[in-house]
Amino acid sequence: MKYPLLFLISAGWLLGCNNVSNLGKTGSDSDSLAGVTAARDSIIVLDSITSADTISAVVPGDDPVIQVTVPAETLPVTRLQRTITSDMQSIRLSVTDLDVGQLRVSITHSKPDANIRISQVIRPDGSMDGPYGQQLVYDIKQRGTYIIIINKSNMASGTQAGDVFITLER
């Protein structure tokens, strides 16, 4: 009887401490943060323990995803350049209307010791494959849009910030 009562008291205490129903509310409902969206160049970070009216910080940030769309009929594409400005960014390269065959992808960086790789391939059916290195020969088995994600490896050190050069060939 002692342990179930201790469990119930502990569970009640945890639920009470983690109550976020007041998060984002101030003195009145008209001051709520529910309708506020962050500007493109900033991220609003709220402390999960205190209410929103007591602590918030604005952290400068970059758009976390650099979107690039390449229609398959424009292949080959050599030295497509994009600039990554932070280690939190990634490049999302969509190759549209890609037909069956092989796709060769190669990436290079302006800094020879940069931490950059092809981390995932997302197939038209939503399934994923990866991670890879800086070169990839991929067998395209179904027609559609293939998404190639390029970013840093979390298993290696170094920055990915700088110019990335992408080559796509059939």
Image: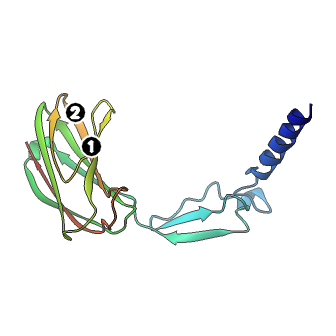
- What distance separates the C-alpha of mark 2 from that of mark 1? 10 Å
Q: Residue at x 87, y 40 (%)?
A: 6
In the image, residue 81 lies at what x, y percent?
18, 63
Please identify, in this view, whether the residue under mark 2 or under mark 1 is nearer the observer.
Answer: 1
Q: Residue at x 40, y 66 (%)?
A: 62
Of the numbered discs in the image, which one, if any, rests on residue 121?
A: none
| Amino acid beneath label 2 | Gly
Q: Nearer the viewer, residue 164 or 44?
A: 164
Where's the N terminus, which quadrant?
top right
Residue denoted by label 2 = 144
Q: Secondary structure at mark 1?
A: strand
Q: Identify whether 38 is placed above or below 100.
A: below
Instruction: Please state if 73 lies on the left or on the right of 68 as rendered.
Output: left
In the image, residue 31 lies at what x, y percent?
72, 62
Q: Secondary structure at mark 2?
A: strand
In the image, residue 32 lies at what x, y percent?
70, 58
Q: Residue at x 71, y 56 (%)?
A: 23
Where's the C terminus, which quadrant?
top left
When asked about the image quadrant of residue 157, the answer is bottom left
In the image, residue 21 lies at what x, y percent?
75, 50
Q: Nearer the viewer, residue 45 or 11?
A: 11
Of the numbered discs in the image, which one, if any, rests on residue 147?
A: 1
| Amino acid beneath label 1 | Ile
When asked about the image quadrant of residue 57, the answer is bottom right
Instruction: Please state if 46 lies on the left or on the right of 131 as rendered.
Output: right
Q: Nearer the viewer, residue 151 or 66?
A: 151
